[in-house]
Image (cartoon, rainbow, N blue to C red):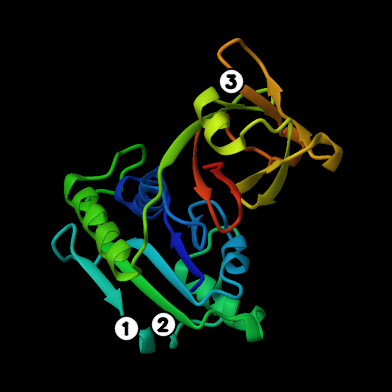
Amino acid sequence: MRKVVIVGCGNPLRGDDGVGPRFIRYLWERGLPPHIKLVDGGTSGVDVVFHMEGADEVVFVDACCTGEKPGTVFCVPHEEVEELPSSEEANLHSIKWYHAVAIARHLLNGNYPKSIKVYLIEGKSFGIGEVLSEEVESAMKELAERIIKEYSIEEGKVVELELKEDGYLIIPADVAERYLGGCMSVLVIPRGMHFTLLPLPTSAQGGLLLKRINKEGDRAVLLWELLPPGTPSGKKKAVWSDEEGGLVVSLI
């Protein structure tokens, strides 16, 4: 199965410039299989490069400002991607998609992606604190459908969990029953801004204790030691992965 990495670039605090990160969230909410890796490049910096390692194909989505009609979608030709600036021009604290490609070419060597595509959406408004314009949001959704169709992505059933401020992940009773059965512990495998929750048949296999916290049967597992610094609490999306045999939980 092809490993596809989709990266959304841009600043989510500056109106249409945030279409890339918003695109990633929109796809996640649709529920995608685990071989489609979604990366929020809005704040990842040079980490984006390492998410690209070993991928069959990387797809970048970003905003642009060329003077064309807002919502216009451009696809950067492959030969133009190959003629990008050198990695020396990159600012590692505010990396652009073309800098990520240049650095990846320099660092990844044999693990450089086999193919890279870049989609740019013409923006309308880039003011601080503004939301996406109607034109850009509509174009973003149309592009999402295009990519889902192009890569024959089978959408999964999305469930919702909750990460508390104290680091406990709350799993509703129906989700726990459907995917975790009667297990008393789970194995957590961190993968950047998502992790996989694997049910363990017996507590003798170790793992983290999966507690029953109320009469309804909701469960909780303490994750705080495994979370990336600054992980926000709140509602989190998850999809079941047959390939991994566990729940893939997003932290974005």
For residue 51, what is the image quadrant?
bottom right
Residue type at numbered disc 2: Val
Q: Secondary structure at mark 1?
A: loop
Q: Are marks 2 and 1 in contact (CB under 8 Å)?
A: yes
Dot 3 crowding, Cα within 10 Å, few <14, some 14–19, many 20+: some
For residue 185, what is the image quadrant?
top right
In the figure, 37 relative to 229: above or below?
A: below
Q: Which of the pair 243/44 is nearer the observer? A: 243
Residue, disc 1: 77
Q: Which of the pair 17/110 is nearer the observer? A: 110
Indicate which disc, 3 or 2, sits on the residue closer to the N terminus: 2
Residue, disc 3: 218
**Whole-Å distance between the Cαs marked 3 and 1?**
50 Å
Q: Nearer the viewer, mark 3 or mark 2?
A: 3
Dot 2 crowding, Cα within 10 Å, few <14, some 14–19, many 20+: some
In the figure, 186 relative to 171: above or below?
A: below
**Whole-Å distance between the Cαs marked 3 and 2?**
49 Å
Q: Secondary structure at mark 3?
A: loop
For the point 28% across and 74% down, the residue is 75
For the point 37% across and 89% down, the residue is 79
Residue, disc 2: 81
Indicate which disc, 3 or 1, sits on the residue closer to the N terminus: 1
Residue type at numbered disc 3: Asp
In the figure, 159 relative to 134: above or below?
A: above
Q: Are marks 3 and 1 in contact (CB under 8 Å)?
A: no
